[in-house]
Image: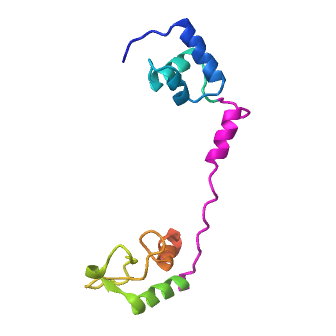
Amino acid sequence: MKGQLWTPEETERLRALVALGMSPLEVAAEFPAYSRNAILGRADRCGFRFYSRSTGGTVNKVKAARLKKAPAPKRHKITAEERQELIATTVIDSAVTLDELNDKICNFPVTDDVPFKFCGKEKQRGRYCEAHWAISHQSVKLARL
């Protein structure tokens, strides 16, 4: 901490830059003697707001548009019968042992007996193939069936 006091001229300049809508980082570039946190603290103590708290502020509209989230992807709903069928076909088709697992294939467990067997199909989503991703992301109620 530098312990440097703000002069009235610097405080007035800070107020003007905040009023122009500059970000704290941009204002910090204008005041090389002060850190960004010192500028944020001074602005807060003086009641200057970098971003308008009202919903009508221009900065808030721009920020809101930038932060708008894309709609969440819809989950593929499967029935209990489809779930059992997917598990059964995986065991028949391409099951691999623990030693054969790698980072390119689905590692959904398909057997409970030793040696454990895993799906072995190509990964599509995260750690699983498309079918096993759908199984693993079902509701708790459906998973118990």
Q: Please tell me whether residue 137 is drawn above or below residue 121 in the rendered image.
A: above
Q: Position of residue 70 (x, y in %)?
A: 63, 56
Which of the 4 quarters of the picture holds residue 26? top right
Q: Please tell me whether residue 21 is drawn above or below residue 133 in the rendered image.
A: above
Residue 74 in sight: yes
Instruction: Identify the image's colour scheme: rainbow, by chain, secondary structure or one colour.
Output: rainbow
Start-end of magenta stretch: 52-81
Q: Position of residue 117 (x, y in %)?
A: 32, 84
Q: Please tell me whether residue 125 is drawn above or below residue 11 in the rendered image.
A: below
In the image, is residue 63 part of the stretch drawn in magenta?
yes
The residue positioned 39% from the left and 78% from the top of the image is 105
Q: Quadrant of the N terminus?
A: top left
Of 73 and 35, nearer the camera is 35
Residue 123 relative to residue 118: left or right: right
Q: Does the magenta stretch mainly form a helix, a strand or a loop?
A: loop
Farthest residue to the top: give it. 8
Image mark count: 0
Farthest residue to the right: give it. 56
Residue 39 relative to residue 119: left or right: right
Q: Please tell me whether residue 98 is drawn above or below residue 44 in the rendered image.
A: below
Of 70 and 19, nearer the camera is 19
The residue positioned 51% from the left and 7% from the top of the image is 7
Q: Position of residue 92 (x, y in %)?
A: 41, 93
In the image, is residue 72 part of the stretch drawn in magenta?
yes
Q: Position of residue 78 (x, y in %)?
A: 57, 78
The residue positioned 53% from the left and 16% from the top of the image is 45
Residue 47 in sight: no
